[in-house]
Image (cartoon, rainbow, N blue to C red):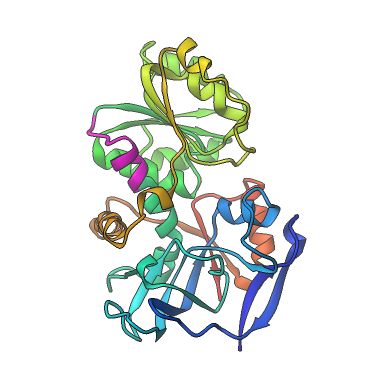
């Protein structure tokens, strides 16, 4: 037997249950991982609330963790029992002591990277990798706007931007978060609780505005983000922290300067084992070089996942949060 977090109905954090389960034996092409650390992400809340529908109920939760392979299914040759591994995709259920998932979604973890760092950085770090290196391949010298620059993804993005020679303007909600983002490499910060984001971007860029806006907030910042862009530049919407962007009239992209927009996802980029391995190698190289450091600011017992999600949703966290089985 093992423990896991599950939910039988959608709703607030009170729907999360800490239950005993029998871990699934891996089938063909699958492995089972004994988790040592589990990542906490906004997408977990989207599934819990029903914004993203779970395949069935009751359902496990979470897609990101790091640990040790403890069982291998038929046909798996790339991984062995005892291998240190990490993952950020696959079926819901990472909020568990043991999780069974396709071997194609698992990468080997270098000895130089500990389980907590991996669990705190796989989803967030791979997200930054595809956003900065693939959705728009930043080369250096660009000016970008990044919403929620002091959060888990934002903290990695600030560091990666600095390493690339990119001027990242980060939005934050307090002086403390501004200081954190700047320590991580943000070129400038804007406190959206006290400042007009569009006007500050115009001042900071001498009226040039931004080459790319990366927006994980969603509904509340959609039009603000569009107004921060240069003509013919790119709006990247990759999250829904304030709710989904709905009812968009494509004509607004014309009115605001023949803009481009995209709604990417990790699964859309890490869609083969080869692409996933390439992206993970890039992330691990940044971690090993010290150019990107992961701040594990908060740790909760896995059984207290609901409390951890409330803190994340209430914007009471900075850096990354992990759950410890």
**Quick check: 130 left or right of 145?**
left
Point 57% across, 20% down: residue: 249
Q: How far across and how far down the image is residue 304, in percent?
A: 67, 68
Q: How far across and how far down the image is residue 187, in percent?
A: 36, 31
Question: How many dots with numbers?
Answer: 0
Quadrant (top left/top right/bottom left/bottom right) for the C terminus: bottom right
Q: How far across and how far down the image is residue 27, in percent?
A: 45, 81
Q: Nearer the viewer, residue 322 or 33?
A: 33
Q: Nearer the viewer, residue 69 or 286?
A: 69
Q: Is residue 281 above or below residue 187?
A: below
Q: Answer with the quarter of the image where residue 223 lies.
A: top right
Point 40% across, 48% down: residue: 268
Q: Examine the rendering and report whether any part of residue 184 can be seen.
A: no
Q: Is residue 138 magenta?
A: yes
**Quick check: 137 left or right of 4?**
left
Q: Nearer the viewer, residue 180 or 9?
A: 9
Q: Nearer the viewer, residue 23 or 30?
A: 30
Q: Is residue 268 above or below residue 276?
A: above
Point 31% across, 62% down: residue: 273
Point 56% across, 19% down: residue: 196
Q: Examine the rendering and report whether any part of residue 25 can be seen.
A: yes
**Quick check: 234 left or right of 274?**
right
Per the rendered image, the range of residues in magenta is 129-140
Quadrant (top left/top right/bottom left/bottom right) for the N terminus: bottom right
């Amino acid at each position: 037997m093992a423990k896991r977090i599950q939910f039988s109905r959608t709703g607030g954090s009170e729907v999360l249950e800490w239950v005993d389960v029998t871990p699934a034996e891996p089938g063909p092409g699958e492995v089972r991982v004994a988790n040592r650390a589990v990542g906490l992400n906004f997408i977990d809340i989207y599934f819990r609330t029903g914004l993203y529908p779970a395949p069935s109920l009751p359902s496990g939760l979470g897609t990101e963790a790091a640990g040790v392979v403890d069982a291998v299914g038929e046909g798996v040759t790339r991984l062995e029992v005892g291998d240190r591994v990490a993952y950020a995709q696959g079926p819901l259920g990472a909020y568990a002591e043991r999780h069974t998932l396709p071997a194609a979604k698992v990468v080997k973890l270098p000895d130089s990277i500990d389980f907590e760092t991996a669990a705190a950085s796989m989803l967030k770090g791979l997200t930054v990798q595809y956003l900065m290196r693939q959705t728009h391949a930043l080369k250096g010298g660009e000016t970008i706007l990044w919403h929620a620059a002091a959060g888990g993804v934002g903290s990695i993005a600030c560091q990666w931007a600095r390493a690339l020679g990119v001027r990242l303007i980060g939005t934050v909600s307090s002086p403390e978060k501004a200081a954190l983002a700047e320590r991580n490499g943000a070129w400038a910060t804007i406190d959206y609780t006290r400042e007009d984001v569009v006007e500050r971007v115009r001042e900071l860029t001498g009226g040039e505005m931004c080459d790319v806006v990366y927006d994980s907030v969603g509904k509340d910042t959609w039009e603000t983000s569009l107004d921060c862009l240069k003509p013919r530049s790119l709006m990247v919407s990759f999250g829904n922290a304030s709710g989904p962007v709905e009812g968009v009239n494509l004509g607004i992209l014309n009115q605001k300067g023949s803009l481009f927009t995209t709604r990417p996802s990790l699964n859309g980029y890490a869609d083969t084992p080869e692409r996933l391995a390439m992206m993970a190698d890039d992330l691990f190289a940044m971690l090993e070089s010290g150019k990107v450091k992961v701040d594990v600011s908060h740790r909760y017992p896995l059984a207290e996942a609901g409390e951890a999600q409330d803190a994340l949703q209430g914007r009471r966290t900075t850096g990354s949060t992990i759950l410890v089985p």
